[in-house]
């Protein structure tokens, strides 16, 4: 079966999300880079949580990438991103650059999944105003 431009757009968005998560969040934590621990400490989390959070993020990404569990992966990842947003709100970081960054990531993640998954599009159809 030939993939439509919509499906390819979804794959690109999902790929960008996965690459960002792996490169900017998971890898520094799993590789024990000092920036990961320093960032968690600055956010009020113990440095000892770096590995655990990195493994949770990796599990979320794996669930999201695998087609049969992508919906579960998106839901669990959104919970993780919600916790990240709550942390940013709690310490009073800037709204648009820090507090809402998890929302931006979530929109890219869900948008990619919606574009590449016909079952999700059927569950949440896009409708223009005035069309029944």
Image: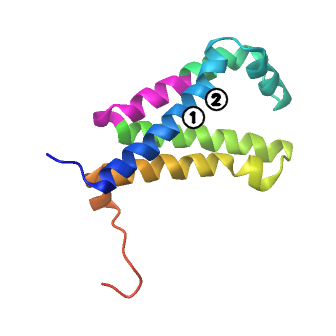
Along the line of sight, the residue nearer the viewer: 109 or 72: 109
Residue 69 badge:
none
Instruction: Indicate the position of residue 26 as horizontal and vertical percent values.
Output: 59, 23
Q: Which residue is rendered at x = 76% and y = 46% of the image?
A: 98
What numbered label is drawn on residue 20? 1
Query: Helix or strand or loop: what does disc 2 sit on?
Result: helix
Q: How far separated are the C-alphas under marks 2 and 1?
A: 5 Å
User: Which segment did they paint magenta?
Assistant: 56-69
For the stretch drawn in magenta, the main secondary structure is helix
Of the 4 image quadrants, the one containing the N terminus is top left
Reply above or below: 38 against 77: above
| Colour mode of the rendering | rainbow
Which residue is at 61% across, 17% downward?
52
Residue name at image x 70 percent, y 18 percent: 49
Residue 65 is drawn in which quadrant? top left
Q: Is residue 66 depicted above or below 78 in this figure?
A: above
Percent x, y of residue 53: 62, 23
Quarter assignment of residue 66:
top left
**Camera-nearest residue between 91 and 105:** 105
Q: Residue 63, image x and y in percent? A: 40, 30
- In the image, which disc is placed on residue 24? 2
Q: Residue at x 81, y 44 (%)?
A: 90
Is mark 2 in CB contact (under 8 Å) with mark 1? yes
């Amino acid at each position: 079966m030939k993939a439509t431009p919509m499906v390819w757009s979804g794959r690109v968005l999902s790929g960008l999300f996965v690459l960002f998560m792996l490169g900017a969040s998971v890898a520094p934590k799993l590789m024990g880079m000092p920036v990961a621990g320093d960032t968690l400490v600055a956010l009020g989390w113990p440095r000892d949580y770096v590995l655990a959070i990195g493994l949770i993020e990796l599990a979320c990404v794996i669930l999201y990438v695998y087609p049969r569990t992508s919906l579960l992966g998106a839901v669990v990842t959104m919970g993780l991103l919600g916790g990240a947003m709550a942390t940013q709100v709690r310490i009073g970081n800037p709204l648009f650059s820090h507090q809402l960054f998890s929302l931006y990531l979530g929109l890219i993640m869900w948008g990619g999944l919606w574009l590449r998954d016909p079952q999700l599009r059927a569950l949440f159809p896009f409708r223009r105003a005035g069309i029944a």
